[in-house]
Amino acid sequence: MKVVILCGGKGTRLREETEYRPKPMLPIGERPILWHIMKTYAAQGHKEFILCLGYKGDVIRDYFRNYLWHVCDVTMQLGHNPSLTFHEHHEEEDWTVTLAETGADSLTATRISRVRKHLGSDKDFLLTYGDGVGNVDVNRAVAEHRRAGRVCTITAVHPPGRFGEIDLNAENRVLTFNEKPQVEVGFINGGYMVCNRRIFDYLPVDEDVMLETGALRQLAAEGLLGSYKHEGFWQPMDTFHEFTILNRMWAEGSAPWKVW
């Protein structure tokens, strides 16, 4: 199945990091968070990507245009007959990446409408945001989507806590402290959606609207929006603090989203 990734937002809450690059290109370790998201899908057999570009989309274009320069050693022959030799193979050789311009200021529903032509005749496609990682079992989400026969199935996740969680005893001594734990009660939309192409009937082509406040609300009202509950790890990168948390996890070798 093709994977549509929304990569066009401005990431205003991370302005200190996104002034010169789009949020999907913020790094976790040595690679952008977008690469981590794509690796999660590819590890589960989904290697055809459609990237909805917008704000500073040229940065994403340049990254994939020069991908071999980022992942391989290279030997350059200078002189009158210059040549390049890229050494080693890399795991992304069987990826297909479509870079689609969807407008600098477009809203999410509009971006999805504008890449419809790249889906071909596929009945279903995968959809997610370019700023959150998780160890989501994508294929189980697909199975739930097809079993229920919904137009769209969202992955329901527990939101990460905004503040440190502490456990106190009767004397007010702190017994445990967990920084930004997963909240066990309640669910939010964590992306990693599965969509039937009927969703385009709910995406207006002549109006710039949000997927979340338009189509998803209408589908829910009509009983056509399903969910796949993910009880595992999920973490967005909305703030500099979350950017730091994800990078620390990666540096410590304790990144739960690394399923490859």
Image (cartoon, rainbow, N blue to C red):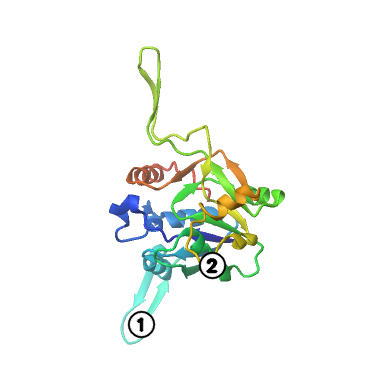
Mark on residue 198?
A: none
Which element type, helix, strand or loop, lies under badge 1? loop
Residue 130 x %, y % = 45, 55
**Badge 2 local density, few (<14 within 10 Å), some, or many (20+)?**
few
- The residue under label 2 is which amino acid type? Val
Quickly name the residue at label 2.
205
- Residue 156: quarter of image: top right
The answer, for residue 44, to whether it is visible in the render is no
- Residue 60: quarter of image: bottom left
* Image point (67%, 52%), residue name: 150
Quickly name the residue at label 1.
82
Image quarter of the N terminus: bottom right
- The residue under label 1 is which amino acid type? Pro
Residue 239 x %, y % = 35, 46
Q: Earlier in the sequence, mark 1 or mark 2?
A: 1
**Badge 1 local density, few (<14 within 10 Å), some, or many (20+)?**
few
* Image point (42%, 54%), residue name: 33
The answer, for residue 229, to whether it is visible in the render is yes
Residue 153 x %, y % = 61, 50
- Mark 1 or 2, which is nearer the eye? 2
Disc 1/disc 2 C-alpha distance (Å): 48 Å
Q: Taking 6 as reference, is 14 left or right? A: left
